[in-house]
Amino acid sequence: MTIRQLTAPHAVLLEEPQQGLPQTSEMIRGERFRILEERDGWLRAENAFDGHAGWLPPGTAHREPAAPTHRVRALRADLHPGPTHKAPPVATLSFGSLVTLDGRAENGWVGTDDGLWLFAGWLEPVDAPAAADHIATALRFLETPYVWGGRSSFGIDCSGLVLTAMAGAGIVSHHSSGMQRKDERLGAWMSDDGRDVAYRRGDIVFFPGHVGLMVDGATLLHATVFTMSVVVEPLAEVVKRAEINGVRRPHHVIDGSART
């Protein structure tokens, strides 16, 4: 079994080893993956983060795994060739990307093990405590473009937003709204149709082929093709377009550890 680590800022996972086919998910810098198959330069990869498998295009940069020391906590973070904002960035990392620092530090900048530099304020240690409020994490993605199969600040879909927000709270699920609907790790099942639910901040609301997060008792945050972006809108408006087919309440919302 061959384990590799993504060094590209992000990479698509496709349904089949062919350009132009639908993206099923995305990997971000520093994530490890298991190579399941190789075909004409394409790699069928299983992401260790969430277990999602798909095809990585030829030329996707990866390496032998190194232990990450820090995670990008900014929505996006530029990699610079020197420890200064005046050096034009050479790449941009998404929220959640993993990096390994090499011990260099200068004027608030820190060096990475590939010889580049990041502003230290964009990072947190990989063992930093999980976020208490997954909605605060999700709200940072407002106006991010909708991208089918995306789960980064470069582009994200509905289940990718839920996956990312809940992972920030220490709960990793699936990159699929249908699988998330069935996943008890995401919380207690509250309703099959949303009726008679006194919604709370943090509730996860499911629709056929779609999912969103409640910001408060009446407002939904979701990545939607309706606007091709991450937006906040009244739940009542979303229900005019699609019927609710499930509601989950994360356990940290039930026990009150999520901030409101």
Image (cartoon, rainbow, N blue to C red):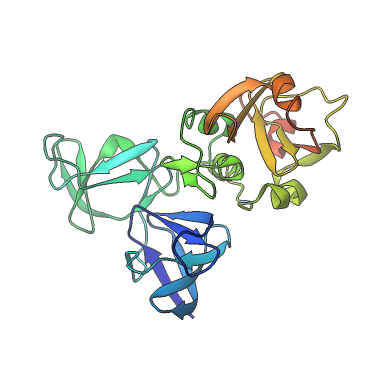
Is residue 241 depicted above or below 25 in this figure? Answer: above
Q: Quick check: can you spot residue 15?
A: yes
Instruction: Determine the residue positioned at 46% across, 33% down.
Output: 144
Instruction: Determine the residue positioned at 38% across, 57% down.
Output: 30
Q: How many marks?
A: 0
- Residue 153 left/right relative to 200: left
Q: 143 or 170: which is nearer to us?
A: 143
Residue 93: % across, % down: 34, 46
Kindly indicate the quadrant of the structure image that contains residue 157: top right
Residue 224: % across, % down: 59, 34
Quadrant including the C terminus: top right
Residue 166: % across, % down: 60, 42
Q: 160 or 172: which is nearer to us?
A: 160
Residue 6: % across, % down: 38, 62
Identify the residue at the far front of this view: 20
Q: 256 or 71: which is nearer to us?
A: 71
Is residue 99 depicted above or below 83 in this figure? Answer: below
Q: 25 or 72: which is nearer to us?
A: 25
Is residue 36 depicted above or below 49 in this figure? Answer: below
Instruction: Determine the residue positioned at 55% across, 26% down.
Output: 231
Instruction: Determine the residue positioned at 48% across, 70% down.
Output: 17
Q: Quick check: can you spot residue 260?
A: no
- Residue 31 left/right relative to 187: left
